[in-house]
Image: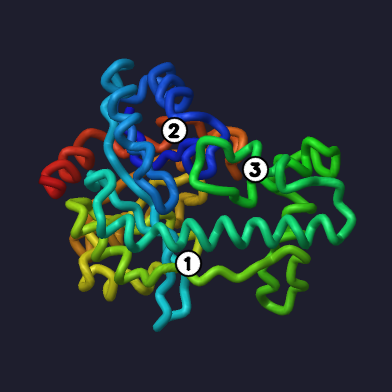
Amino acid sequence: MIDLHCHTKVSDNSFTIREVISMAKEEGVSHLAITDHDTTSGLLEAKLIGHELGVHIIPGIEISAYDYSRQTRAHILGLYVTPGHNALSELCEPMIKKRHEASYAMVERIIAAGYDISWELVESYAVGGTGVYKQHIMHALLTKGYTETIYGTLYKKLFSRGEDGAAEGIAYMKLDYVNVYDAIDAIRQAGGVPVLAHPKQFNNFAAVPAWKTAGLQGIEVLHPLHDEQAEKLSRQIAVNFGLLQTGGSDFHGFYGEREGCPLGSKSIGEEHLMRLQEKAT
């Protein structure tokens, strides 16, 4: 099996690099792309552990981006990137810092609203990573008994964006993401293959032609958020614009939004992996 989209505790997975790769081995995954959010800091360790356990690790990244001309979000996967490449570090490190600072401000708002948590408790769940994510905040609230799930009513109450006239969450904070064109360019500079992740989530299918012109080389067809219709549309777009087709579980462990999607559950197949490898070289 092949899994081209997976996270570790370096970003927002509840499991460490070793735990994730060990689980991949147990699930029969032969090729695993580690694509932590906005960082490549765990990739060298992952390569060593993968070699030890017999799982081929594909070095990757998932960049949180925004197309400011179209006012749409986008997550861009970079597959076969060079770990630690300056183009990625210079683009993403400010984003990591801003996210961590925003998380601190969110926690302050939540405490002010009467929830009995602390920044120290929240941070304890992010040890070994690049910073605090909303999942770590929810983990603290779960520990304190305010919720039974990471995602659900309380998550929406705290973090909803307030779109379509809905009330904004009490801890919602707007983040300025990196420009999607800079993300694609940085991945190319780092020797990687830029792939549009889960296009259904942000409904950004219409932007593919412009992003392809800018250097986009693939689209994620198989993903837990994709139903049959989204898969079909993604495949058709891939064919129409000559894009690679990828797929992955987007595994986040305990912090995952979808149950029943273990590592390797969205395997794209060897034919598409070979095309990806040819493009990477």
Residue 162: horizontal and vertical position, in percent? 70, 72
Amino acid, disc 3: Glu
The residue sitting at 59% across, 50% down in the picture is: 133
**Mark 3 touching mark 2, by CB under 8 A?**
no
**Residue 42 falls in which quadrant of the image?**
top left
Image location (x, y in percent) of residue 224? 50, 44
**Image quadrant where one finds the N terminus:** top left
Secondary structure at badge 3 equals helix
Q: Which amino acid type corresponds to the residue marked 2 in the rendered image?
A: Ser
Mark 1 = which residue?
Answer: 203
Q: Residue at x 35, y 45 (%)?
A: 40
Q: Quadrant of residue 174?
A: bottom right
| Inter-mark Cα distance, 1 to 3 | 33 Å
Residue 244 x/y as whole percent: 23, 52
Any mark on residue 123, and which?
Answer: 3
Question: Given the current orientation, which residue lies at the most extreme right position?
Answer: 114
| Residue 255 located left or right of residue 86 | right
